[in-house]
Amino acid sequence: MSYLNSEKKYVFQTYKRYQILFVKGKGKYLWDDKGKKYLDFLSGISVCSTGHCNPKVVEAIQKQSGKLIHVSNLFYIKPQIELAKMLSNISFGGKVFFSNSGAEANECAIKLARKWGDGRYEIISFNNSFHGRTIATLSATGQKKFSKGFEPLLSGFKFADLNDISSVERLINNKTCAVIVEPIQGEGGVCLATKEFLTDLKRICKKNNILLIFDEIQCGLGRTGKIFAYKNYGIEPDIITLAKSLGGGLPIAATIAKKGIAEILSYGSHGSTFGGNPVCCAAALEVLKIVNNKKVLKNVEITGKYFLDKLNILQEKYNFIKEVRGLGFIIGIELNIDGKEIVKRCLQRGLIINCTQDKVLRFLPPLIINKKDVDAAISILEDSFIE
Ligand SMILES: Cc1ncc(COP(=O)(O)O)c(C=O)c1O
């Protein structure tokens, strides 16, 4: 496997990779270089929600790339305007800034909140959160393991506990401009904020004139069974950040802010060379058309419940399963034992899943899977519990 040595020699060694080389993807399946087929219950970590190489997304990319691949944001970009309109219409009627990654979408939200704060600059985030790897988003991330060695971090971030509203209230002062929260902490181990907590959070943000930012980079765009996670809770954030699945595999991110807030970032105050690139926007338009569909969302809701039920049955059988949690197709099972070996055994048996926080098996399947796929995954998972 010469590519293994070349990767070691030529690529920064920042990723601990499994010794698999995928060469083809179609729908919910991936194939490696030896022709082995895998059922994908990870979707490139919540990216390929519409399935690998979805024909409509592929067609949109091919069409747009044959016409115009890039033009600077000094000029109008038609697919970008169409995508912004669609995102605005399906959310809360705000305006959109496009960038290329989740970290950049959050970076934009942080800059916007600070400028809006007009002297108020503190942002309350949460322990166990994950918001990205740039210095600002690492500073907003509530897990020290990611920022170790990169200090000093950006000042102005404080950390409360998810689902503990008094821990948020204690941190609010006359310098606070925003709260940033993942409604479901993904990297943190699939930890769900409660409806009661998010409702309280909205209330105290409103009362104190503080912006509420929802990082929906991992859990948004249909993954919870609603087009945006916030729609599960009957409240609206002021800003949402999106990335991952938006481009169907192409790099695009969006920061959507309510009208009256978005305008704070005026001419020249923020920008991105590739942000809102025509090809990425054309792909994202197709992705949105596919996922913002009643049938697709209903499938996530119903099959997600079916999946949770099946995992709960496993929990009754195996005492090393501590907790099963999730919503729609963002599901985690917390173990009392290390999860990495189970992930390896699943891969050997042709199922792609992931482990986060050492002990949480995470499932982020494409939104197109059905109950049969769940049964297949459960069967491989259970086999993989035994060495
Ligand atoms: C909730 C959340 N926010 C931000 C990010 C950062 O996204 P990116 O890796 O595209 O910068 C991630 C990535 O895992 C994420 O899950």
Image (tube, rainbow, N blue to C red):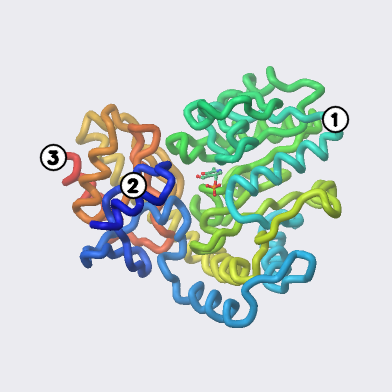
State the CA–CA distance, disc 3 to disc 1: 58 Å
Query: What element does badge 1 sit on?
Result: loop
Q: Nearer the viewer, mark 3 or mark 2?
A: 2
State the CA–CA distance, disc 3 to disc 2: 21 Å
Q: Quadrant of ligand 1?
A: top right
Q: Which residue is mark 3?
A: 387
Q: Position of residue 175 (x, y in %)?
A: 79, 24
Query: What element does badge 3 sit on?
Result: loop
Q: Which residue is mark 1?
A: 119
Ligand 1 closer than 8 Å to label 2 CB: no
Three-letter amino acid code at the position of disc 2: Arg
Looking at the rendered image, the quarter that the C terminus falls into is: top left
Asked whether 342 or 152 is in front, the reply is 152
Q: Which residue is mark 2?
A: 17
**For the residues bearing labels 3 and 1, Cβ distance under 8 angstroms:** no
The residue positioned farthest toward the left in the image shown = 387
Crowding at mark 3 (Cα within 10 Å: few <14, some 14-19, many 20+):
few
Q: Earlier in the sequence, mark 3 or mark 2?
A: 2
Asked whether 12 or 338 is in front, the reply is 12
**Relative height, residue 354 to residue 61 (above, below):** above
State the CA–CA distance, disc 1 to disc 2: 44 Å
Ligand 1 closer than 8 Å to label 3 CB: no
